[in-house]
Image (cartoon, rainbow, N blue to C red):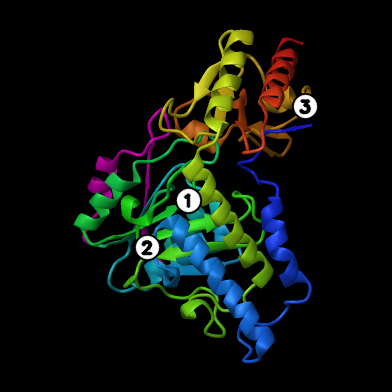
Amino acid sequence: MIYLDHNATTPVAPEVLDAMLPYLERAFGNPSSAHEYGAAAKTAVEHARAQLAALLGCAPADIVFTASASEADNLAIKGGALARLGERDHVVTSAIEHPAVLGACRYLERRFGFRLTILPVDGDGLVDPDDVRRAIGPGTALVSIMHANNEVGTVQPIAEIAEAARERGVLLHTDAAQSVGKIATDVDALGVDLLTVTGHKMYAPKGVGALYVRPGTRLDAVIHGGGHEHGLRAGTENVPYIVGLGAAAALAWRRLQNGTAVRGLRDRLYAALVDAVPGLVLNGHPDERLPNTLNVSFPGADGERLLASAPSVAAATGSACHSGRTEPSTVLTAMGLDDERALGAVRLSLGYDTTAAEIDSAAAALAGAWTS
């Protein structure tokens, strides 16, 4: 099987697994313990914190480890908004955010009476920074706009959006779960106050994530208990997985410095499909897009059935099945695609180990499924 679903999850890189194994075996200490076992675990956690900080261009003390990107999103959004409860009562986000972001925003609206503005996107999936600027008012506590979309790969103009937020003293959070490790995510260049990271989209295991917190940013804790992670995330640190995230960050830094062939392979796949499938349509921005992500609509096809007819290709659609009826992707409908085009969409997301031979075989299999 040809794996083209790296935006859903990545395999654990061999270098990452090798870094983790000692902490699953003999180096099992609790980082909060004062003895030698604890000291070794604490040193490993702090080394991983420094590795991730180097990838993001921040200080190690700015990193808070979590169990997932969803938890980091919740800490950023709920924590940022509730720290300003009674001062500000408005949150701004976009229509194409991950459910963790939209769910956290709706929770604030439902339980605490926050006003919620959900901004539209254009046909390429882009948020207009001027829409953000117009949405911000005196009562706005926080803006949360993702860095790159998981379905179509469109990369948002976060630096411009950050300017709009900074002008009004509003926190800016970006969910960078899909972009960290694939494109540059320097927090100062982006201008963000809060940035979400996940391990399993960058060759670390599932079950570990992180939140970058700009110094001076006030957050309420969401998980209460001991004073772990600067008092923002209670719970004994998951040392092996944190070590894995750090190793993945170091690996990503080296790959970004050296460059990869993934963009060229993505474009090779697109060219092959365009040649074989008349009327094939690209979804997402043609240029401002993750280098590994290709979302295309096959004319007259149902994406789910198409993939079922090409079992050698592991890929995804954004469609959802409710009560036996397939519903089109909410991201694609927010971009203005009609149901037929949205239901015919397939997301093909490449990895660093994807080969040219796999690309050619996948294109042939998908084209064959469309014509059959």
Relative to residue 372, is residue 331 drawn left or right?
A: left
Q: For the residues marked 1 and 3, what is the alpha-carbon distance in whole angstroms?
A: 30 Å
Label 2–label 3 contact, CB within 8 A: no
Residue 117 belongs to magenta span:
yes
Q: Residue furthest front?
A: 258
Q: Of tags 2 and 1, which is closer to the observer?
A: 1
Task: Give the Cα distance between marks 2 and 3.
Answer: 43 Å
Quadrant of the drawing holding the N terminus:
top right
Label disc, if present, on residue 117 of the rendered structure: none
**347 versus 41 height, above or below:** above
Say what amino acid the circle numbered 3 marks: Ala
Question: Of label 2 and label 3, which has the lower sequence position?
Answer: 2
Q: Which residue, given by chain and number where applicable, does mark 2 sit on?
A: 114
Crowding at label 2, few (<14), some or many (≥20) Cα neighbours within 10 Å? many
Residue 366, above or below 254: above
Which residue in the protein does label 1 denote?
Answer: 176
Residue hosting label 3: 308
Q: Nearer the viewer, residue 352 or 162?
A: 352
For label 3, count other residues whose C-alpha is less than 10 Å away and answer few (under 14), some (14-19) or many (20+).
some
**Which three-letter amino acid code belongs to the residue tagged 2?**
Phe
Extent of the magenta region: 112-138
Where 259 falls versus 92 (above or below)? above
Residue 175: percent from the left, percent from the top? 47, 52
